[in-house]
Amino acid sequence: MKEKMRCSWPENNPIYLAYHDNEWGRPVHDDLKLFEMLILEGMQAGLAWITVLNKRDAFRQSFDGFDFNKVALYGDEKIQELMANEKIIRNRLKINAAVSNAKAFLRVREEYGSFDKFIWEYVDFKPITGHWECHNSIPTRTPLSDRISKDLKKMGFKFVGSTIIYSFMQATGIVNDHLTRCFAYSEILNSST
């Protein structure tokens, strides 16, 4: 059996491989999942993505399954509990940002009906397809991620710099940045046409 061609970044790490094959670059339209990815991308700032993936289940458990309605209500006691939890990334600014972002997320849902509708409107509800042949060619930010970042900051979101937002766009399939030789590239391309 011929081995699947993939992007190079997952290497042979089983967690990375599963994430690459089943999630990364695949369009997400569920608000709960979009919120999860927004928070996890913010948590990653300054760290390797594998660190976040290794702690993902603990994050889900600690943050009530990333239920933005519940996270928006977190007060000092819950924040202290999270700061004491060795299974997650214990950065007070990032934890506080998750709570602020949940509140901002709810405001977006109130105004637009869903965060999905709000975020996908930036790309006319169709993924942007990159045509990259090597990983080093893929940008870490774009004029569009700059714009979304700026808009989100105005709405009260935190840890949403342009690089974080571009990673979020890649993770949630707003952008398909799989290498052209990767099996997922054509799978995603064919499913979105």
Image (cartoon, grey):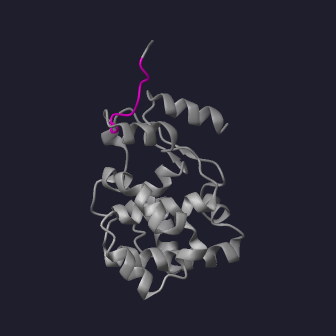
From this viewpoint, which residue is outermost toward the top? 1
From this viewpoint, which residue is outermost toward the right? 113
- Is residue 4 found inside the magenta-colored segment of the image? yes
Q: Nearer the viewer, residue 74 or 178?
A: 74
Which secondary structure class fits the magenta region best? Answer: loop
Q: Nearer the viewer, residue 161 or 34?
A: 34
- Is residue 103 found inside the magenta-colored segment of the image? no
Quarter of the rendering containing residue 87 = bottom left
Q: From where the camera sits, is residue 146 visible?
A: no
Quadrant placement of the N terminus:
top left
Q: Is residue 93 above or below residue 114?
A: below
At which x and y percent is residue 40?
43, 61
**Image point 67% across, 62% down: which residue?**
117
The answer to whether 6 appears left or right of 50 in the picture is right
At which x and y percent is residue 77?
42, 86
**Image point 40% across, 36% down: which residue?**
17
**Image point 38% across, 32% down: which residue?**
133
At which x and y percent is residue 56?
42, 56
Q: Is residue 38 above or below residue 10?
A: below
Q: Which residues are magenta?
A: 3-10
At which x and y percent is residue 168?
47, 57
Q: From where the camera sits, is residue 87 visible?
A: yes
